[in-house]
Amino acid sequence: MEVSDSWGPVASAVWRRVDVPDGLGYGCARGTASGFRLEATEVVHDDTTAYSVAFTVETDKTWATTAAHATVIGPTMRSELTLLRSAEGRWHRDGHELTELEGCVDVDIAATSLTNTLAINRLGLAIGRSAELQVAWVDVPSLEFTLSRQRYERLAPQGDYERYVYSDDTYGPYMLTVDRNGLVADYEAFSQRVWYSDS
């Protein structure tokens, strides 16, 4: 298995959702021969329903998304979504080009903190720098996708964690604390990490 010098074979975590009555998720990231693979499962009970979502995201060695697959299961639903991104940057679903996602490099699965790892590691921001990007944002549980304009600003570290301000067009700014592998520890008003391993 080919990985970068700073990345162990597997980094994995469990997050507790703080924005819903009950929510718990497990996710992991690992190096592959062609890049990186992120995998996660989330189980959520909110005010109206309960569901689980499982997803996989494949990237190249620069952390740019090449494929994403998500499956949602609930009391009255079962849906799947597969998005593919070509080497030329074109997105496809079921063989059809998705011109509405033109310019996106990353995918963001709404149910989890894990996919923030993609942009954080790909951008490699220095302290005090920021970047704006376009992301293929996937809503959960509907699995509807749209182009989302997002911004990351890296702040000075706090203890063992890096700090970022994340913001988007819809939900506004949030503080993220992030470990050395780019996995979110705390995501303001969304999730808190309760377990972690990088071995």
Image: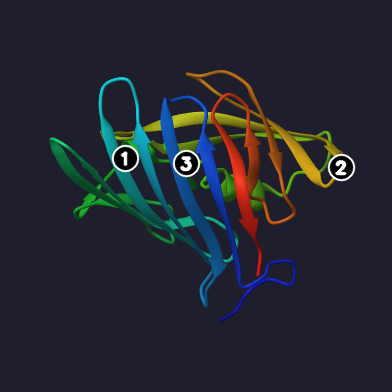
The answer for how far apart the CA atoms under marks 2 and 3 are is: 24 Å
Q: Quadrant of the C terminus?
A: bottom right
Whether residue 56 sits left or right of residue 31 in the image: it is: left
Looking at the picture, which amino acid does disc 1 mark? Thr
- Give the vertical position of 89 relative to 100 (above or below): below
Secondary structure beneath label 1: helix
Q: Earlier in the sequence, mark 3 or mark 1?
A: 1
Q: Nearer the viewer, mark 3 or mark 1?
A: 3
Q: Is residue 182 visible?
A: yes
Picture quadrant of residue 178: top right
- Residue at x 57% of width, y 57% of height: 63
In this rendering, does residue 109 appear at all? Answer: no
Q: Closest to the observer: 190 or 88? A: 190
Sequence order check, earlier mark of 2 and 3: 3
Which residue is painted at 52% across and 28% down in the image?
Answer: 18
According to the picture, the residue beneath numbered tag 3 turns out to be 112
Numbered tag placed on residue 159 in the rendering? 2
Q: Are marks 2 and 3 in contact (CB under 8 Å)?
A: no
Q: Residue furthest left?
A: 76
Secondary structure found at label 2 = loop
Of residues 111 and 154, the one nearer the viewer is 111
Q: Position of residue 191 (x, y in %)?
A: 56, 34
Identify the residue shown where x is 68% and y is 67%.
7
Residue 12 quadrant: bottom right
Residue found 59% across the figure and 49% down from its top? 117
Q: Which residue is mark 1?
A: 99
Q: CA distance from mark 1 to mark 2?
A: 43 Å
